[in-house]
Image: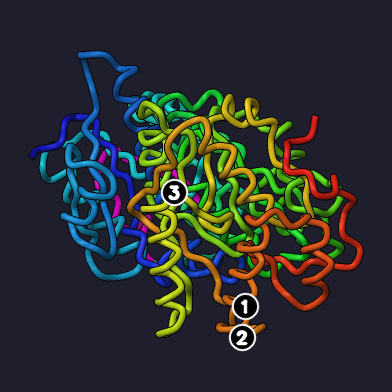
Amino acid sequence: MAPRPEHLMVFTRFPVPGRTKTRLIPALGNEGAALLQRGMTLHTLAIADQFQRARGRDGVPSVEVRYEDGSAALMRAAFGPQRVYRRQPAGDLGTRLQSAFAESFARGARSVIAIGSDCPALEPVLLEQAFAALRTHDLVLGPARDGGYYLIGLTQPRPELFQDIAWGTEHVCEQTRTYAQQMGLVVHLLPVLDDVDEPADLPHWQRHRGRYLPDARAPRISVIIPTLNEEECVARAIASAATAAGVEVIVADAGHDRTGETARTAGATVIRCGPGRGRQMNCAARAARGDVLLFLHADTTLPENYADDLLTELSAPRVSLVAFPLRIEPANGRLHVIEALANFRARWLGWPYGDQALSVRAETFRALRGFCELPLMEDLDFVRRARRLGRVAVLSSPVRTSARRWLANGIIRTTLVNQACIIVWRLGLSVDRLARWRRPRCADVDGRHVRSSRPRSVSGRRRAPE
């Protein structure tokens, strides 16, 4: 398909874990960094779509996606079949940009702009300003605060602008402007914006993500993560939640390490509250703005496309609670058996546990008066009460949870103790007595250790707090 006179190219890459957003992998992990790449690409494409819609019928620019890794089929599956996808050639960024511009001009374009997918603050109005500037200027640059640029636009091929540039350094934009001056080009500069390349940049993504996606003015889903000294894994959980549009992430922290700071850096809202998972989740739910509340463990990550599947299932008649299948990683033979039993129990018996990311409509949560603030079993108590209001549904894509609690205390021991606790709880044993029996070594059914400084709770009562 030939480009139109005004042509926009979106440079990105298919989100292959371990090959994308590599500087964020120490904070987010391979999977989390790939999920972030996918979310940022969707965000950038939504900006391009909004820009095209704002033009109306006349003079609509053409848009194509220039990608690395993956294939056109994978890109269509991930980002929509209606787009034009072209693979970037081999070489450094300069070689790839030079080739893309030369090809676009050779195919008939008269003004060509290239943008990356790393700048969530980009807006459609800036794209309009850039194309307008190219009517009177030779070169348009959108400087990034880290020294690169998030946008470059030209009216004819200028291969010299892409040669001998120190790509990946803070000198990229400065060198490009110097070469343009030497060539006698008339340059227009757009506002300086922030890229998202390092862990410290993640708050920029949190502030802007989803702005141009449908129904993004208010969060559709509030992902709530209770934490107790989880600084090593909380960023991965946040990153998996933040890939969807219209989502806010709230971390309810009761620990004494750097979990709160790590969560803020990853883009979550952090609130402090007393320990106790039920208490923490209730506290965060009171601050949540979403129509759907999803309760996620800090050592668990959500699957891709979780939001659409979740919202679809919760809109079904008579569904009161939705959970995800469980996948334990790293897995072994015994843990596969635990997975199979957990998924059978959730899907066919309607009894998911808390590590399966329990999700309800906000109005359902209020009708249930939240979680009982018990020292343990708050998840099963919540599921039991939700079952009285409707059906429990289980999605097809699993959450991935850490095997650490099974490996720390022994797979067989942890499983037997958990099942024994569930049995005696269902027989009516006081939750406080059960907690005293389990202290201090057993991980509770949701994986957190019950400590001697447990929160006060309503002894033996399972009704929701007033």
Neighbor class of circle 3 (other Cα within 10 Å; few <14, some 14-19, many 20+) is many
Q: Quadrant of residue 20?
A: bottom left
Residue 254 image position (x, y, % from top left): 82, 55
Q: Mark 2 near mark 1, Cβ–Cβ under 8 Å?
A: yes
User: What mark, if any, has residue 350 been given in the picture?
Assistant: 3
CA separation in Å, label 2 and label 1: 6 Å
Residue 98 image position (x, y, % from top left): 28, 56
Which image quadrant: the C terminus? top right
Q: Amino acid at mark 3?
A: Gly
Examine the rendering and report whether any part of residue 192 can be seen.
no
Residue 202 image position (x, y, % from top left): 61, 51
Up/down of 463 relative to 175, above or below:
above
Q: Which residues are magenta?
A: 147-163
Answer left or right for 64 relative to 378. left
User: What mark, if any, has residue 153 been given in the picture?
Assistant: none
Q: Give SS at disc 3.
A: loop
Up/down of 122 relative to 435, above or below:
above
Residue identified by numbered label 1: 414
Neighbor class of circle 1 (other Cα within 10 Å; few <14, some 14-19, many 20+) is many
Q: Is residue 377 magenta?
A: no
Q: Give SS at disc 2.
A: loop
Q: What residue appears at the point 55 percent right and 37 percent down from the top-left corner?
A: 386
User: What mark, if any, has residue 410 been given in the picture?
Assistant: 2
CA separation in Å, label 2 and label 3: 27 Å
Mark 1 / mark 3, whichever is N-terminal: 3
Mark 2 / mark 3, whichever is N-terminal: 3
Q: Amino acid at mark 2?
A: Gly
